[in-house]
Amino acid sequence: MSVKLGVPSKGRLMEKTVDWFAARGIRLRRSGSERDYAGVVEGIDGVELVLLSAGEMPRELGAGRIHLGVTGSDVVREKLVHWDQRVEALAEMGFGGADLVIAVPAGWVDVDTLDDLDAVAAQFRARHGHRLRVATKYHRLVREFLREAGVADYALVDSQGATEGTVKAETAEAVADITSTGETLRANGLKILSDGLIHSSQATLFRSRQAVWGDEERAVLREFEARIGL
Ligand SMILES: Nc1ncnc2c1ncn2[C@@H]1O[C@H](COP(=O)(O)OP(=O)(O)OP(=O)(O)O)[C@@H](O)[C@H]1O
Ligand SMILES: O=P(O)(O)OC[C@H]1O[C@H](OP(=O)(O)OP(=O)(O)O)[C@H](O)[C@@H]1O
């Protein structure tokens, strides 16, 4: 049985993943057209390429349908409860870097920390009759982070894209989103709390703890690990 290697089929992680493996003598390519989601692995035996979205990689790793997979460390932490019991991070790959942060309106000049946010949240509810709304697609990570920080008086608003625009659109008062350069946050009049870093993410090669690791698969894994310098 081959070791199934999941690689992002598109998006910002795909090309750099191919380059990362090529630099280690493992060449990944599609079997056919650009829309062909089957792939070929050259340079190592016993590895089968599976092309899928970065967002779906955690589910496939967590279910053991693929043995190895590349996606963001934020995506795995968000989509897999007790993620480290279901996958193992084999290698941080050095690209796809982004910080998941909590940001508030730049005009909230007295709000710079999570404690300030907690105080504002209590006042907000008293004044407006509903909880302060935080827009994000990272529900699990944001809830865990704010619970540990002792911030409770808020409500999450789901936002699957253009999250930074929700404050000006008055569908939220704060956001939790990915930032690389900070440009989108600034362009939307938002500032990051000084203790508002939830997770520094980067593309990571994960191993599934749920996949079938028989003698054959383990032999391939050892060769694979040697080739990528683990
Ligand atoms: N500026 C950025 N915006 C969004 N994601 C970024 C950024 N920089 C790095 N990343 C990382 O890239 C990963 C998401 O990659 P990408 O946006 O390609 O996924 P996706 O293709 O949108 O996923 P899906 O296929 O599920 O839609 C995440 O781990 C994220 O942290
Ligand atoms: O800090 P910055 O450099 O401004 O990058 C952060 C922005 O980049 C992403 O949007 P993008 O439109 O690139 O990707 P998406 O399709 O995942 O929203 C992300 O959703 C942020 O909005």
Image (spheres, rainbow, N blue to C red):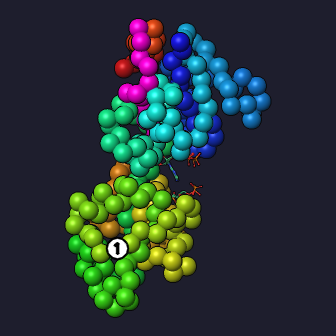
Between 97 and 11, the one nearer to me in the picture: 11
Quadrant (top left/top right/bottom left/bottom right) for the C terminus: top left
**Percent position (x, y) of residue 211?**
44, 24
**For residue 90, above or below residue 167:** above
Q: Is 49 situated left or right of 177 in this image?
A: right
Q: Quadrant of ligand 2?
A: bottom right
Residue farthest to the right, as pictured? 33
Q: Secondary structure at mark 1?
A: strand
Question: Which residues are drawn in magenta?
Answer: 201-215
Look at the image and tell me whether residue 110 can be seen. Answer: no
Q: Amino acid at mark 1?
A: Tyr
Q: Identify which residue is drawn at 41% across, 12% down.
A: 214
Residue, disc 1? 154
Residue drawn at (51%, 77%), measured in percent from left and top? 171
**Neighbourhood count class around disc 1 (C-alpha, 10 Å): few under 14, some 14–19, many 20 upward:** many
In this picture, is 197 found above or below 122?
above
Q: Does the magenta segment cover residue 157?
A: no
Q: Which one is nearer the viewer's eye here, 151 or 14?
A: 151
Residue 87 place in picture, x, y as percent: 38, 32
Picture coordinates of residue 63, whole percent (x, y): 46, 33
Residue 199 appears left or right of 72 = left
Q: Is residue 43 visible?
A: yes
Q: Residue at x 74, y 33 (%)?
A: 34
Residue 143, given in percent of the width and then of the height, sits at: 33, 60
The answer to if 208 sits in the magenta stretch is: yes
Q: Nearer the viewer, residue 145 or 109?
A: 145
Q: In the drawing, does residue 148 fall left or right of residue 169?
A: left
Given residues 218 and 27, the one toward you in this image is: 218
